[in-house]
Amino acid sequence: MTLSPEAAAEFRGLYDQFAPLVRSLAYDRLRDWHGAWDVVHDVFLALIQEMRRGGRQTIAQAWIVKVARNKIVDRVRLDQRRRERGRVDASTPDLSIRPDEQRQLEQLHAAIADLPENERLIVWLFYLDGLSAQRVGALTGVPVRTVYARLARARRSLRTALTTPAKEVC
């Protein structure tokens, strides 16, 4: 059974509107772009199934975020089981980067992870997904001025975290 033309148009609109948010939420937790895209696909497959059932006339942002959080937890558990079994995912490419670049990336990820959730999400959406401040505001439900204020606060926090020399453990 396929979606009606109206449902397909609704699906496309929901995907365009919420895929960046779902991807950012997933990447924030997983730190893996491939895993984040898997979560996006899983969420929108669940959306198609829900639309086919016809149980909901309109799908709300809250429903999509709830399903995304559940799919993220499922992905975290799957990754844990794979690590426990010692299996390496063959689909993961071998991206060789220099140790100093790896350390810088880890520091950046750690600094972003230390940001408050509302700032962290805006940083992902604005800088990594490349969304405009207006779009970020629409997705998060905050005014554009608040988006810019949170970005400025996040940049100050990141600058401080990344320019402060790391404390050595003895």
Image (cartoon, helix red, strand yellow):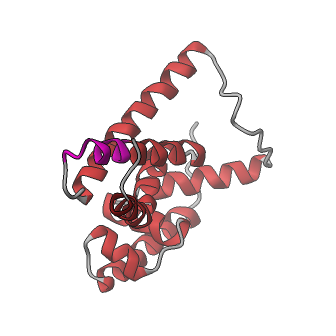
**Count of numbered circles in the view:** 0
Q: Quadrant of the C terminus?
A: top right
Horizontal relation, residue 99 to residue 35: left or right: right
Residue drawn at point x = 54 percent, y = 41 percent:
35
**Residue 68 seen in render:** no
Q: In percent of the image, x 49 and y 57: which residue is there?
A: 111
What stretch of residues is rendered in magenta?
A: 46-55
Magenta stretch prevailing secondary structure: helix
Picture quarter containing residue 34? top right
| Image quadrant containing the N terminus | top left
Q: Residue at x 44, y 41 (%)?
A: 42
Can you see residue 17? Answer: yes
Residue found at the far top of this picture: 85
Residue 150 lies, in percent from the top left, at: 35, 75
User: Does the magenta run of residues contain 90?
Assistant: no
Up-down relation of residue 65 to residue 135 (above or below): above
Residue that sits furthest to the bottom in the current view: 145
Queried whether the magenta region covers residue 54, the answer comes back as yes
Expressed as whole percent of the image width and height from the top left, the position of residue 11 reads 38, 59
Nearer to the camera, 25 or 107: 25
**Residue shown at the point (32%, 38%) measured from the top left:** 70
Percent x, y for residue 13?
39, 66
Q: Nearer the viewer, residue 117 or 50?
A: 50
